[in-house]
Amino acid sequence: MTDSAPQRVALVTGASRGIGKAIAMRLARPNTIGGGRHVVLVSRSAGPLADLQHQIESAGGSASHFAVDVADSAAFAAAIEKVAEERGRLDILVNNAGITKDGLALRMSDEDWDSVIQTNLTSAFVAIRAAARSMMRNKFGRIVNISSTSGVVGNAGQANYAAAKAGLAGLSKTIARELGGKGITCNVIAPGFIETDMTANLPQQVRDHVLGLMAVKRLGVVDDIAHAVAMITADEAGFITGQTLCVDGGMTMC
Ligand code: NAP
């Protein structure tokens, strides 16, 4: 984009903490590849989003926020459509909000299956459908679905989560094919083990085991994922679509 072109608008779900917060800060950071976006921050809790908006603005960036449960499809879709209408555009969509409800498959309740599928997979479909019209109108779009290496190679105790995350790959390839002609790309980023609230309570022996599997001998940090998202949503990344990029320190090399 040239200096006179309108600022691109990015929407990041699960932006109140962890990976989503880092993605939002990175996409807002001025004068960086894939940065300088107006970032719309989304999660269920308004307080942390307001704090993050303030933090981004204090660093010279631009942001706004709204609180919604992404599992409430009607409310989530309506909020996205409102953003696109009010801002006149929605260029970048990062479906990052996610939950785990782990348990062995044979003991997993329907409720734990359904809620993980709804929050981690169905919400991404709902968001894409709501955002696509604006992207098609502007003949530009970058969609990133945050998956997990669990969705690529499976993980005992995570049937619901791995199925939802694997589903994001099929969804993304299909969207890439359906909307590629309109200047819209759709990709998956699959983090490996990243230090956040989601992984804070894992036993030390699990952490040691995971570390042993990694080519890069350290656990991931949220900025590892944020930089990958900035790269794949850059204006220059228009020829990368339908891909799954595992950002996992060489754990799976998938
Ligand atoms: P986290 O620290 O638990 O943060 C999850 C984020 O999602 C929070 O901002 C949370 O905000 C939001 N969220 C959860 N349910 C929501 C809902 N129903 N509606 C709206 N927002 C919701 O998780 P994380 O570790 O940063 O993970 C972020 C993404 O990366 C997830 O999709 C996760 O599956 C994926 N991932 C993480 C790792 C890892 O090692 N950490 C590895 C692979 C993949 P509120 O609670 O405020 O709503």
Image (tube, rainbow, N blue to C red):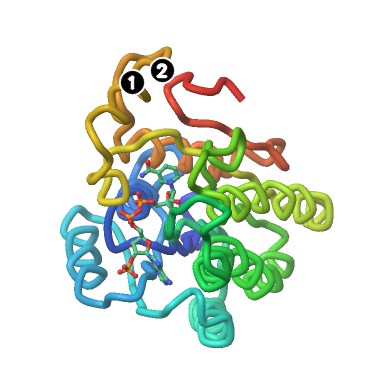
Give, as a three-letter code, the residue at label 2.
Answer: Met
Q: Is residue 128 above or below residue 217?
A: below
Q: Residue at x 17, y 67 (%)?
A: 51
Q: Is residue 196 above or below residue 219?
A: below
Give, as a three-letter code, the residue at label 1.
Answer: Leu
Between 183 and 144, the residue placed more toward the observer is: 144
Q: Is residue 124 left or right of residue 99?
A: right
Q: Is residue 144 visible in this depiction of the protein?
A: no
Residue underneath mark 1: 211
Determine which of the numbered discs, if any, sits on residue 214 in the image: 2
Within 10 Å of disc 2 (Cα), the crowding (few <14, some 14-19, many 20+) is some
Q: Residue at x 35, y 22 (%)?
A: 209
In the rendered image, residue 224, in percent from the top left (x then y), is placed at 37, 33
In the rendered image, residue 133, in percent from the top left (x then y), is placed at 71, 73
Q: Residue at x 72, y 42 (%)?
A: 242
Determine which of the numbered discs, if any, sits on residue 57 in the image: none
Q: Disc 2 on helix, strand or loop?
A: loop
Q: Is residue 73 visible in this depiction of the protein?
A: yes
Q: Disc 1, disc 2: CB below 8 Å?
A: yes
Q: Is mark 2 within 8 Å of ligand 1?
A: no
Which image quadrant shows ligand 1?
Answer: bottom left
Between 15 and 254, the residue placed more toward the observer is: 254
From mark 1 to mark 2, how far is it between C-alphas? 5 Å
Number of marks in the image? Answer: 2
Q: Picture quarter containing residue 221?
A: top left
Q: Is mark 1 within 8 Å of ligand 1?
A: no
In the rendered image, residue 248, in percent from the top left (x then y), is placed at 45, 28
Q: Picture quarter containing residue 238?
A: top right
In the rendered image, residue 126, in percent from the top left (x then y), is placed at 63, 72
Q: Disc 1 on helix, strand or loop?
A: helix
